[in-house]
Image: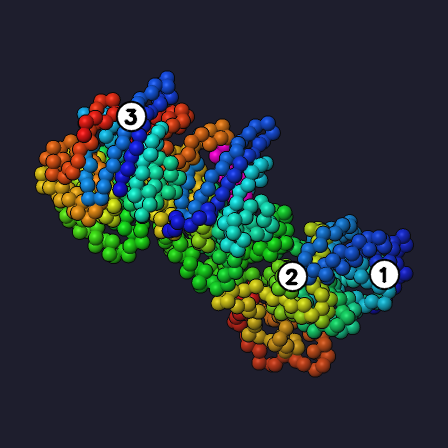
Amino acid sequence: MIDVKNLCKSFVLHNQGGAVLSVLRDVSLHVDAGECLVLHGPSGTGKSTILRCLYANYRTQHGTVRLRHQQRWVDMAGATPREILTVRRHTLGYVSQFLRVIPRIAALDIVMEPLVRNGAEHAAAKRSAQAWLERLNIPQRLWHLPPATFSGGEQQRINIARSLIAAPPILLLDEPTAALDGINRQVVIDLIDEAKRRGAAVAGVFHDTEVRDAVVTRLFNLDISGAPYGR
Amino acid sequence: MNTETDTPLLRVSGLTKRFGAHSACCDVGFEIFPGEVLCIVGESGSGKTTLLKCISAQLQPDHGSVEFDTRDQGLADIYRLSEPMRRMLARTDWGFVFQNPRDGLRAGVSAGANVAERLMAVGARHYANIRHEASGWMQKVELDARRIDDLPDTFSGGMQQRLQIARNLITRPRLVFMDEPTAGLDVSVQARLLDLLRGLAADLGLAAVIVTHDLAVARLLAQRMMVMRGGSVVESGLTDQVLDDPQHPYTQLLVSSVIQA
Amino acid sequence: MKPDDPGPTGYNFAYLDEQTKRMIRRALLKAVAIPGYQVPFGSREMPLPFGWGTGGIQVTAAVIGKNDVLKVIDQGSDDTTNAVNIRRFFARTAGIATTERTTDATIIQTRHRIPETPLAAGQIIVFQVPEPEPMRRLEAREAETRKMHALEEYGLIRVKLYEDITRHGHIATTYDYPVMVNDRMLMAPSPIPKFDNPKLDRNPALMLFGAGREKRIYAVPPYTKVRSLDFDDHPFEIQKWNQCCAQCGATDSFLDEVITDDRGGRMFVCSDSDYCRQRLAAGQRAPADQPDSAAASVQAAT
């Protein structure tokens, strides 16, 4: 479902005298359906960067980043913007580390949107969104409010609901439980398990060892130079 | 919203426009598909407004072509079409939202007449129906429909902009061009207008080309983005890509210059 | 009436030189070829200022011949100052016969009315036009209005009618009411009351329009379709009165309101003086029990 080969990613900071930050060197990994690959390593080793490259949020300098999309492989590193958007819409769910919220839209509408966008009937999408919000313990009084004023944990749960509601075949999770309490951590663990069981491929970064150990199928280790080690 | 078709709605190739020795636009090319929103971002003098005018049939380029997917001829160079055909497209299949709403509205007639003009231009002849449609569109852009008989200058700037949007959308154009649609408005008014635009683009499956100097507008409205400088496109790609991982020095400068509130 | 004097020397027949007449006739031919289309022409200096019918006079001068009989009316009447002056102008410069009877005229020059008596094939009616462009008030740019006519883009005039209904509950234009000629050209019929618009449709006479100040000529050939603009649910309607003419009793003519004293007394009489006269000569009279004019209401008049 995910097949990365020889991925290299660096940043050139033109406004800082052209300094080059090499973050990933020759990374290769794969994730099969039903697996959860945990990206593991110290801070700054490029774990989030890998996820962002998978999502095509970051460009890559070298290598292929192939995702299984509707019975064919798409190389996100070389795909056109249109193709990437299609893959994101139908195949990818992405919970990012940074909680950038779309302003002034109610939580319920944010969660519903991936379903509505793909043609789901409005009332059914709404019911589904409500179910997800309930599962993630978002109180009903918050459903019609924009998440900008929510706590970090609440925002994160909105993002999780939104990313998972359309049951995407590939999930990219970047610290999905960072701001969550014990109860909600467990909910997320259950959600990831369900995703694996329905055949999704999950790639994630988890600093919380409890969560990591509960969901991991395999570890992928990165060392400080951005190169993989061991395994 | 169908992003699976193969024919682009608009294809720009090698577009060049000079004013004397000065190159306002140099060899610009891109495609837009139905339902896509593209933001052209740049600072003053970058050539973005010239580009917008060239692709919306207001200014003929010196080189290159602008092809639009017409309903009966397929992809056709808009500057090879007859003028009546071009004007018809501009009235029905395209919309153009001016930066200053007064450029896009008739000051001497009521809001309803402004909104409904395009309908009447394509043959609508039933007064009550015309009025009903105009009223409906005013509501869609979140204006009080009871103000349908008021003159445009009795509305605030933000509301005039909404009127202009309604006036353009009433014929359900497939492609809308916008020139700095939120510039000059108060920040809170801008925000609400952007929300409206985002909602409308999603609901109606509009394709749009939006020229702006404001990166936040691009982030909020556009899936794709092009950065222009000195008449050339220095970077283009998905909006989140360009803003989170800018490659070109100028883009990096732009992104880092934005003050986060 | 034949002129008393043989006419001033030094002027060509009907004042204009032959080359100018040719130029105007060329314009008229073009105008007739495209009904309702405004043809630019080289409007000449006439011995009266712009705004007093110089366009109409030039058209009449270009088409009038020795054997023509001319009638001139202003607001329907043959004996207003302007009508008298124009008629005398042609009598002096062309020596042609003039008349007040519609049926006897071969050329009728008119300001602001079409005679009640139906016109016949072979007659020419010449309209004096102040503003030939029906969309001028909405679109000041000549280049733009020309394009609109060329491309049949008439949304703007509909906007104006829409606005009228919005403001007044009905289309408030009561004169110079825009028409579609031959299903193609939008035309300003000159400031005739909308009451007269139906007379334009398929009229057997040749209708010529001259705007001297604006330098445009247009025409509607005989039997051409002329349709007043309207909305499906606000159809075109002409003015109606509750009264008949206080003199001849006509119920089908355009009535003028005449103030008779300074205590609010008024009466309604035919605007077309010849029509009224003919009816009186034929023995028609107003009924004795006319409703009190001061209390009467006028439907849809100005």
Same chain under badges 1 and 2? The reply is yes
Q: Mark 2 points at which residue?
A: C189
Q: Which amino acid, mark 3?
A: Arg
Rendering coords of residue C10 (x, y %): 89, 52
**Picture coordinates of residue C234, whole percent (x, y):** 50, 66
Q: How far apart are marks 1 and 2 (CA)?
A: 28 Å
Q: How many labels does the image show?
A: 3
Label 3 lies in what chain? A
Screen quadrant of the C terminus of chain B: top left
Residue at the spot of label 3: A25
Q: Earlier in the sequence, mark 1 or mark 2?
A: 1
Q: How far apart are marks 1 and 3 (CA)?
A: 103 Å
Amino acid type, callout 1: Ala
Residue A102 in view (yes/no): yes
Residues tagged 1 and 2 counted as in contact (Cβ below 8 A): no
Q: Which residue lies furthest to the front in this view?
A: A231
Can the viewer see residue A105 in this picture?
Answer: no
Q: Give the range drawn in magenta.
A: B46-57
Q: Residues within 10 Å of mark 2 (few under 14, many from 20)?
A: many
Q: Do callouts 3 and 2 point to residues on the same chain?
A: no
